[in-house]
Image (cartoon, rainbow, N blue to C red):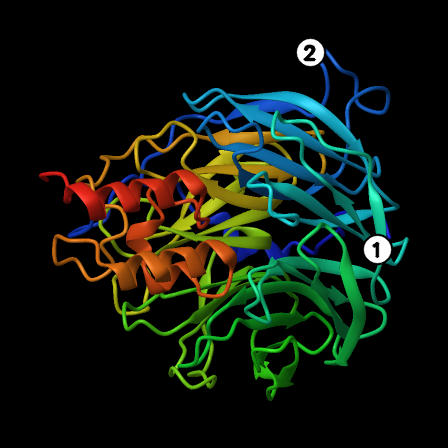
Amino acid sequence: MKRIRLGRSAASIIAPLALVAAVAWAGLPPLSFAPRVDVPLGPDGCVTGVDCSEGAVAAVAGDFNGDGDLDVATANNGSDDATVLLGDGAGGLVVSATLLAGAAPSAIAAGNLNGDAVLDLVVANETDVNVSVFIGNGDGTFDDAVPVAMGGSPDGVVLADFDADGALDLATANLSSESISVRLGNGDGTFGDIVTTAVGGGPIALAAGRLNADANVDLAVSLNDAASVVALLGAGDGTFTVGEPLPVDEGPQGLAIGDLDGDGDGDIAVATEFFDFVGVLLGNGDGTFAENVSYAVGGFPESVAIGDYNGDGIADLATADSFGTIELEGSVSVLAGNGDGTFQDAQAFETDIGPWGIVAADLNGDRLPDLVTANLDSADVSVLVNTGTPPTPACVGDCNGDGDVAINELILAVNIALGSAPVSACPAIDANGDGEVTINEIIAAVNNALSGCPAA
């Protein structure tokens, strides 16, 4: 199903119109981003409908060519492909490849599927009822797509180690079949038999993380038709127990898992498009959650990214608002966290038209996450480089902040890299704040264990 932005009544967009791009709030470091830089999804001078990819709806970050700089890949719903954009280490992105996917790509994920320490890509194809697996070559190029059948209309996709065997597994949220499908990875880029679990309610997006006290990877899915989110608790063998629906505002879309209140438990943030909110569900540590608390953002938010955008060590939120504000045709809303699971009012920053997907990644190595939006209506991505004050350099791998990296912390770091533990279990291993743990960050942690943490 091709994505289009639906029309809206005047009354439905009054709330987001008041958002302004304020730069600071009392008592918190300021939120600050450079003016957007738009990068077309094609060769220089490409023409929309001719040689530009179109309808970008999702984005993922990772080091696809092994140079130590973060890159970005998008899933393009309008042109049935994916675009790879290589980072220059200074905040810039350059298109390097277009990958032919299936019909109506809706989501994208990155991970090492075959154990070669090189990132691969998986794109969910909503109309083809499958995902496209692209094996990476380590230089920013990828092999041709290998289709893997999933449930009906896969709209969300994640890669994580659900059975703790060291190999990444695959899960999709299937809109038309109202289910979650899981295939366990074989460690060589292929997958085992499909296991499908009914969840109901129009599942449209998926996130992986730890939602209770065990070490198993759990899932959260947004149910667009049921105005709710469901937590699926992992058993550690690739199967899940479906929880009760958690009510949120109408039109839940993209969601993310992270520790929003600093208690070590997994929380959920979800973009709800119909009334222009981001919802927060604080976890109790046992797979249950407090009631949803909503925060106003820009018009029709489609996705959300968790990151420390002002460098204060507290989780913040950013949403891609496809209808922007009264002043901005497209925008992201950034909400500074207070550290207790509550958030300041949203501040709007301009993007190109129709931002749909959002990813946080430190593109210039300054320890502050930058933002990249995949823009449905403008055949490009918008890059917003974070211009805030970088945090004090951390000791990579020092999970408990005692100034040393112990063997148990290294083990936890490896588990996070494999997807069997969430980044929130040890934020200090995620040196660049992009929500992923790479081999370079593991090496940095090992060096700190051997040589001691650097002086602050």
Q: Nearer the viewer, residue 242 or 280?
A: 242
Label 2 crowd bin: few (<14), some (14–19), many (20+), radius 10 Å:
few
- Marks 2 and 1 sit apart, C-alpha to C-alpha, by 33 Å
* Image point (59%, 69%), residue name: 162
Q: Secondary structure at mark 2?
A: loop
Q: Position of residue 279 (x, y in %)?
A: 49, 68
Q: Residue 261 location in percent, x, y?
A: 30, 69
Left or right of residue 180: residue 216:
left
Q: Residue at x 25, y 63 (%)?
A: 339
Q: Secondary structure at mark 1?
A: strand
Q: Amino acid at mark 2?
A: Asp
Sort mark 1 into few (<14), some (14-19) or many (20+) by Cα contacts within 10 Å.
some
Q: Quadrant of residue 93?
A: top right
Can residue 170 be seen at all in this image of the molecule? yes
Earlier in the chain: of badge 2 and badge 1, it is: 2
Vertically, is 322 above or below 179? Answer: above
Residue 1 placement (x, y as % from top left): 86, 53
Query: Residue 59's spot in the image, x, y percent?
Result: 61, 42
- Residue 432 visible, this orientation: no
Circle 2 is placed at which residue position? 44
Taking the view exactly as shown, the residue that stands out farthest to the top is 45
Q: In this picture, is 454 found above or below 266?
A: above
Q: Nearer the viewer, residue 83 or 144?
A: 144
Asked if residue 166 is positioned above or below residue 218 in the image, the reply reads: above
Query: Which disc number belongs to residue 291?
Result: none
Res 148 label: 1
In front: 346, or 155? 155
Residue most toward the left? 455
Q: Quadrant of residue 194?
A: bottom right
Quadrant of the rendering where the C terminus is positioned: top left
